[in-house]
Image: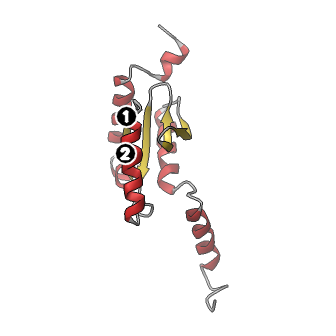
């Protein structure tokens, strides 16, 4: 490896390692920051469902969120697997929202509004947990 030790090699190695084990993406970190900034609670990361793991889940509301990026969907097998996962989630009674990097960067208010709408449709909110009817 003639480039080993060259400028940027260390960072490239860390990125490759992160990508290899499906470590969270910058988009996923941005989405979590958006949730915190909006005061949205009741979510968990990487929840295992009958359909596989979802990026962010609201288990009580059965709302799942996938943060999609081109980097992850680099091949047809991953793309297909995500579609199978989506179908399995819906059939298991979950509502699934998908957000892209573009959504999180250029339309964060719309993403938050859509999530809030999905939680309302599920008749659940973080306040409902603290103040049951």
Residue at 44% x, 29% y is 62
Q: Please provide percent x and percent y for residue 79.
A: 38, 58
Q: Choose between 131 and 74: the one closer to the eye.
A: 74
Q: In this view, does 9 lie to the left or right of 84?
A: right
Residue at 36% x, 42% y is 87
Q: Which mark is residue 17?
A: none
Image mark count: 2
Q: What colouring style does the render use?
A: secondary structure
User: Above or below — where is 70 with respect to 45?
Assistant: below
Reading the image, the residue beneath label 1 is 91
Q: In this view, does 51 lie to the left or right of 21?
A: left
Mark 2 vs 1, N-terminal side? 1
Q: Please provide percent x and percent y for residue 85.
A: 42, 46
Mark toward the viewer: 2 or 1: 1
Residue at 39% x, 19% y is 123
Alpha carbon distance from label 2 to label 1? 17 Å
Q: Is residue 69 left or right of residue 59?
A: left
User: Above or below — where is 90 with respect to 102?
Assistant: above
Q: Can residue 82 be seen from the camera position used here?
A: yes
Element carrying mark 2: strand
Q: Can residue 112 be seen from the camera position used here?
A: no
Question: Which quadrant would residue 5 be assigned to in this image?
Answer: bottom right
User: Above or below — where is 1 with respect to 10?
Assistant: below
Residue lying farthest top? 133
Q: Label 1: how many residues lie within 10 Å, few (<14), some (14-19) or many (20+)?
A: few
Reading the image, the residue beneath label 2 is 98
Element carrying mark 1: helix
């Amino acid at each position: 490896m003639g480039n080993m030790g060259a400028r940027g090699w260390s960072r490239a190695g860390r990125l490759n390692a992160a990508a290899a084990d499906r470590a969270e993406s910058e988009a996923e970190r941005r989405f979590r920051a958006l949730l915190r900034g909006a005061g949205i609670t009741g979510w968990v990361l990487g929840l295992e469902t009958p359909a596989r793991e979802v990026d962010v889940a609201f288990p009580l509301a059965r709302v799942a969120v996938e943060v999609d990026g081109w980097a992850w969907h680099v091949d047809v097998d991953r793309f297909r697997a995500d579609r199978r996962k989506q179908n399995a989630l819906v059939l298991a009674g979950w509502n699934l929202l998908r957000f892209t990097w573009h959504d999180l960067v250029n339309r964060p208010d719309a993403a938050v509004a859509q999530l809030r709408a999905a939680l309302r449709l599920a008749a659940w909110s973080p306040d409902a947990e603290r103040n049951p009817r």
